[in-house]
């Protein structure tokens, strides 16, 4: 059982290095320009599905709220999303359009490959045929955020982010952290 960052939503990111200042938050491989307030970061995990009765992605999201350093640097909130297409679409819309106005949203999910963290560089617009926990698939098998058949690619440099995450956790020999261009066609977020 291991965790995979499912997708990352930057709002004002630049993929270059910068020193920390009152207006810039240093995120190892990325900088984010924000107001003088703490950057608002929302982390989501998923609820139960298949054999995961207690999904580790939501456990990790909740643990971040207990991290003293993270709380000092960021205004953190987290939520657990049901593994259902309609509820994910509603939740993502609520996050971006709600009162919190996050600067960054990070979605976590589980992956079948142990000791590997995939940082998803893209998402697909169509081809979602796997049923969610309600037994549903999206209308016309399309991601409701994007209806193109093309791959939707993040502006974030996920290769740099993967390197930064690997270094931040001490470069353990048993762990692989890498960008991924194959997010699959399960519950969509990007």
Image (spheres, grey):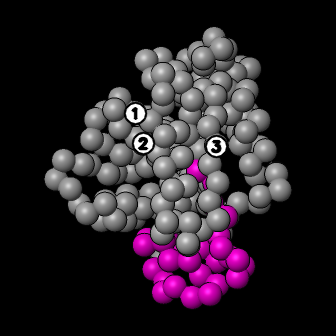
Q: Name the residue under label 3.
A: 79
Query: Residue at the spot x=55%, y=55% of the render?
Result: 65
- Which of the two labelled residues, at mark 1 and mark 3, occupies the earlier sequence position? 3
Q: Position of residue 17 (x, y in %)?
A: 45, 80
Which residue bears the numbered disc 2? Answer: 4
Magenta stretch?
17-43
Question: Which of the two discs, 3 and 2, sits closer to the camera?
Answer: 3
Residue 24 versus residue 64 in the image, above or below: below
For mark 1, what is the residue? 111
**In the shown orientation, is residue 17 left or right of residue 78?**
left
Task: Name the residue: 67% across, 26% down.
Answer: 85
Structural crowding at the residue carrying mark 2, measured as other residues with C-alpha within 10 Å and reported as few (<14), some (14–19) or many (≥20): many
Tag count in the figure? Answer: 3
Q: Real-space Cα distance between discs 1 and 3?
A: 19 Å
Name the main secondary structure of what is drawn in magenta: loop
Does any portion of residue 102 appear in the rendered image? yes
């Amino acid at each position: 059982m291991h965790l995979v960052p499912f997708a990352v939503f930057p709002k004002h990111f630049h993929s270059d290095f910068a020193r920390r200042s009152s207006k810039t938050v240093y995120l190892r491989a990325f900088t984010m320009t924000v107001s003088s307030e703490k950057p608002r970061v929302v982390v989501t995990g998923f609820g139960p599905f298949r054999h995961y009765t207690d999904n580790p992605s939501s456990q990790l999201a909740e643990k971040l709220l207990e991290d003293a350093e993270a709380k000092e640097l960021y205004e953190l909130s987290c939520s657990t999303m049901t593994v259902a297409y309609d509820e994910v679409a509603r939740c993502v819309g609520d996050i971006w359009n709600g009162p919190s106005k996050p600067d960054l949203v990070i979605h976590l999910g589980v992956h079948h490959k142990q000791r590997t963290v995939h940082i998803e560089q893209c998402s697909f617009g169509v081809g979602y045929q796997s049923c969610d926990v309600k037994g549903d698939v999206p209308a016309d098998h399309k991601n409701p955020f994007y209806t193109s058949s093309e791959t939707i690619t993040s502006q974030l440099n996920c290769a740099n982010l993967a390197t930064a995450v690997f270094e931040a956790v001490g470069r353990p020999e048993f762990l692989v952290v890498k960008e991924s261009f194959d997010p699959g066609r399960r519950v969509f977020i990007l």
